[in-house]
Every structure is written in C-alpha cells, then in structure tokens.
Image: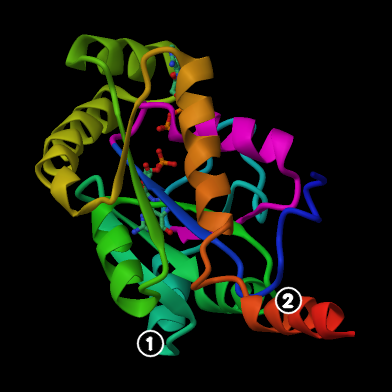
Amino acid sequence: MSEQGARVSGRGVLLVVAGPSGVGKGTLIHGLRGKYSRIEWSVSCTTRDPRPGEVDGTDYHFVSRQEFLQMARERRLLEWAVVHERDLYGTPREPVEHALAAGRDMVIEIDYQGARSLRAALPESVLVFVAPPSIQALRERLTGRNTESDDALKRRLRSAQTEFEHMGMFTHLIVNDDLAQATEALEAIYLAERQRTTRAHFTPLRESLLEDLEA
Ligand code: ADP
Ligand code: 5GP
C-alpha cells in the first residue's frame, strides 16, 4: 500500500517523544522522518544558546527570555516548561493545530512536563517514552555527542532522574539499545496510530462501500 493510500482521512497523528537528554530521541525521530517524509517536525522555541551547527528556525527558534515570555502570555505556545533547571522550552501552537486539523502528521520532542500538558490540551497525543538500556550507556551517549559543558551535562543527568520518575504516564515505551530495533518500534507505533478508527473518518468510506454494493 502506498504511504498516501494507507490513510483514509481525518486528523493527523501527533507523536510526542520524551526521554532523557542523550537517549537518542533526535536520532530516532530523524530515522522515522527519513522514511516518512510526510511527518512534520514541530520546531520548539528555546531560550538556550544554539549549539554549533544548529540552525535557527530548523532545529529550534532561538529566542530571548523576553520574547519567549511574550509568546507565552499571548497564548501562542501550546505548552512550555523550564527544562534542565534553567532554560525555557515551548511548542508553538499554530503549526501543530494547523497541521493536525489538515490531517498532517507531526512529531514533537519534549520533556515529561510538556508531554503532560499536551495530553491535557490534545488528548489524542500519542505519548512515547524513550529509555536507555543503562545509565552507563546514557552517560556515554551524552558525553560522546560532545555538545555539553560539564555544568550542562550534570543538569541533564539530574533531569534524567525526574524523567524516569514520570515514565508511568506514557502509553508507549521504547528501550533504545539497538538503534535499528528502536527505530522499528517507533515506526510500528506511528503506523498503528494512523489506522485508528477514532482518527480516520470511516463513515464516508463505509457509505460508499454500501452504496456500491446496492448499485
Ligand atoms: P537526544 O535527542 O535524546 O538528546 P540524540 O539523538 O542526540 O539524543 O543522541 C545522543 C547520541 O547518542 C548521539 O551521538 C547518537 O548518535 C547516539 N545514539 C542514539 N541512539 C543510539 C543507540 N541506539 N546506540 C548507540 N548510540 C546511539
Ligand atoms: P536540548 O537542549 O538537548 O536540545 O533539549 C533538551 C530537552 O528539552 C529535550 O530533550 C526535550 O526533553 C526538551 N524540549 C525540547 N523542546 C521542548 C518543548 O517545546 N517543550 C518542552 N516542554 N520541552 C522541550
């Protein structure tokens, strides 16, 4: 079945991916979007500094604290939170609401607080938690990525503990040990969600099948 043909109609899938920093969320999402180019990426706003190579408007919207709080006051963020004990991160409202209403799928990488807010705002959200096979592996990935200062690394490991404490609120869990298997698991969750009858408008299809039978 073609990618397009697999879908009937209706609202898009909102895949919400959380888990500790360095666990591989970005890598898994990149793999999924590489295969399903129709899945849109929600570009978050953040007050943290860009890392070398990060592109404003693509990886994040890098904004000042003042701009961020202005957006929050104007309700232009679907959710926002203080992450890693310092920086503000938030999901712009309009692109998500617009994409879902138009039947386009979207993936959001977020912390557990954001996942909780999204579940309240958009109950159809599919909440996926990505866990590492061990703390040792998580540390190695975080340090191996070579993007964080010592202080940022420590804050990220402290946040990991809080993330693990909230694993219970997620509906899906992926242990990212073998990357290929973890990518397959994320794909399976996505494909299953696309086929939900609550999301697809089956009524027109059922009616046209019945009409054709009667003809
Ligand atoms: P996150 O987005 O969760 O912060 P990243 O996707 O940036 O994490 O991954 C952190 C590092 O771990 C990257 O260098 C990535 O290549 C590596 N990585 C991701 N998944 C695996 C895996 N299954 N096994 C080994 N290394 C991995
Ligand atoms: P990083 O600074 O490593 O890019 O991201 C740190 C963490 O911020 C991510 O792992 C994710 O949990 C969280 N995050 C990214 N975007 C958002 C967002 O829009 N809202 C919330 N609540 N958290 C986010």
Is residue 113 shown above or below 98? above
Is residue 81 shown above or below 71? above
**Residue 146 visible in the displayed image:** no
Say whether mark 2 is within 8 Å of ligand 2. Answer: no
Give the left or right position of residue 24, taking residue 116 as reference: right
| Residue at the (47%, 45%) spot, across then down | 49
Q: Quadrant of the C terminus?
A: bottom right
* Magenta highlight range: 20-46
> Which x, y percent locates residue 33?
66, 40
Q: Residues within 10 Å of mark 1 (few under 14, many from 20)?
A: few
- Residue under label 2, please give it: 205
> Which x, y percent locates residue 146?
44, 17
| Residue at the (25%, 34%) spot, across then down | 156
Q: Which quarter of the figure has residue 30? A: top right
Say whether mark 1 is within 8 Å of ligand 2. Answer: no
Distance Cα–Cα, label 2 vs label 1:
43 Å
Q: Nearer the viewer, residue 114 or 201?
A: 201
Q: Which of label 2 and label 1 is nearer to you? A: 2
Instruction: Say whether disc 2 or disc 1 marks the residue closer to the N-terminus.
Output: 1
Q: Amino acid at mark 1?
A: Arg
Say if the magenta span includes residue 182.
no
- Residue under label 1, please give it: 73
Q: Amino acid at mark 2?
A: Leu
Q: How is the image coloured?
A: rainbow
Residue found at the very far front of the displayed protein: 214
Q: Quadrant of the N terminus?
A: top right
Q: Nearer the viewer, residue 30 or 105?
A: 105
Q: Which quarter of the figure has residue 100? A: bottom right
Say if the magenta span includes residue 26.
yes
> Which x, y percent locates residue 46?
45, 57
Ligand 1 position by quadrant: top left
| Residue at the (19%, 29%) spot, across then down | 157
